[in-house]
Amino acid sequence: MAVEIGHAYAAAGAKTHLIVRNTLLSKLDADIAETFTGVFAANHDLHTGVSIEKVHRDGNCYCVVCKTSGGETETLTADALLVAAGIEPQTGGLGLEKTGITLDENGFIRVNECLETSVPGVYALGDVVGNYLYRHTANYEAKYLVQSVLTGEFSGPLQYGPVPYGIFSNPQIAGVGKTERNLQDSNVSYVSGKALYRQSTPGMARRSEHGLVKVLVEKRTRRMLGAHIVGEEATNMVHLFIALLKFQATIDDMLDMIFIHPALSEVAKDAAVDARRNL
């Protein structure tokens, strides 16, 4: 959210500083985060590895006193200050204490695998549940509840399948499935494949200066385990990989498809070719 809003304000003409305690987008795939940070930092005032020592008002301005990892102190001033650090569910004002609906230790509404709360016949979805904090997953949950509760077409517990993410900044970021860190933590044997936009025909036609597609494939089964993209149309291109993961496709299934030339999705094919080469 911070990079999306920060980019939006900067694109509208506001001088914007982004202050990050450690690294930007630390939960994403490391290669994707590194590529994004390089491009983003070249176009925005980005301060990483910084701790905030103090925030105070000076007339109509906010003053943020920062300390770098090297111990140096810097004061940034601005007309407005936006804090985007962590997520807190807004369930406190719903009056749930007057009902039998219970919350978990983090303040999210407790639901079962069918999105039913602790009160039978009462359901919850979206951010207050906290399963996933995306609008597209909230839409998916709403569709499930309409079908299973309102129309009576109950088909069992909600199955999310592969859940994608998207970051609408410049460049865009999108991904689905496992990251390398996930696979390493789980001791899964895998290979990765990468392709740069600028080394592809569509990338050269667009004169792309950056952009990366990365795919992760299990060695034993050759199944696609994850894909992560930074660059133009990332949030559109990722849908190819959502379908592949949904149907547990292999790298060979993907490369048995015909890709339109010279569409940007050919970069995804190039990443798959690189992964198969590494198997």
Image: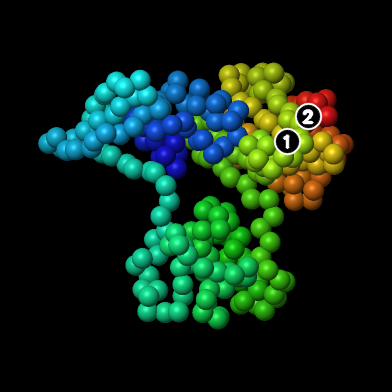
Q: Which type of secondary structure does the marked residue at label 1 adopt?
A: strand
Quarter containing the C terminus? top right
Q: CA distance from mark 1 to mark 2?
A: 7 Å
Q: Position of residue 165 (x, y in %)?
A: 58, 45
In the image, what residue occupies the spot 50% across and 31% down?
Answer: 170
Kind of residue sitting beneath label 1: Leu
When the figure is inspected, residue 101 is found, relative to residue 84, above or below; the finding is below
Mark 2 residue crowding within 10 angstroms, few (<14) / some (14–19) / many (20+): many
Identify the mark nearer the N-term, 1 or 2.
1
Q: Residue at x 47, y 32 (%)?
A: 24
Q: Horizontal placement of 117 versus 247: left or right?
A: left
The colour scheme used here is rainbow
Residue 78 appears in the picture as rendered: no
Q: Relative to 230, is 220 on the left or the right?
A: right
Q: Report the residue at 27% width, 23% height from top.
A: 73
Q: Residues within 10 Å of mark 1 (few under 14, many from 20)?
A: many
Label number found at residue 275 = 2
Is 55 drawn above or below residue 109 in the view shown? above
Q: Classify residue 68 by image quadrant.
A: top left
Where is 233 relative to 197, above or below? Answer: below
Give yes or no for contact between labels 1 and 2 (Cβ–Cβ under 8 Å). Answer: yes
Q: Residue at x 38, y 43 (%)?
A: 84
**Element at label 2:** helix
Label 2 amino acid? Ala
| Snapshot quadrant of residue 152 | bottom right
Observer-nearest of 221 and 176 = 221
Q: Which residue is mark 1?
A: 216
Q: Position of residue 114 (x, y in %)?
A: 62, 70
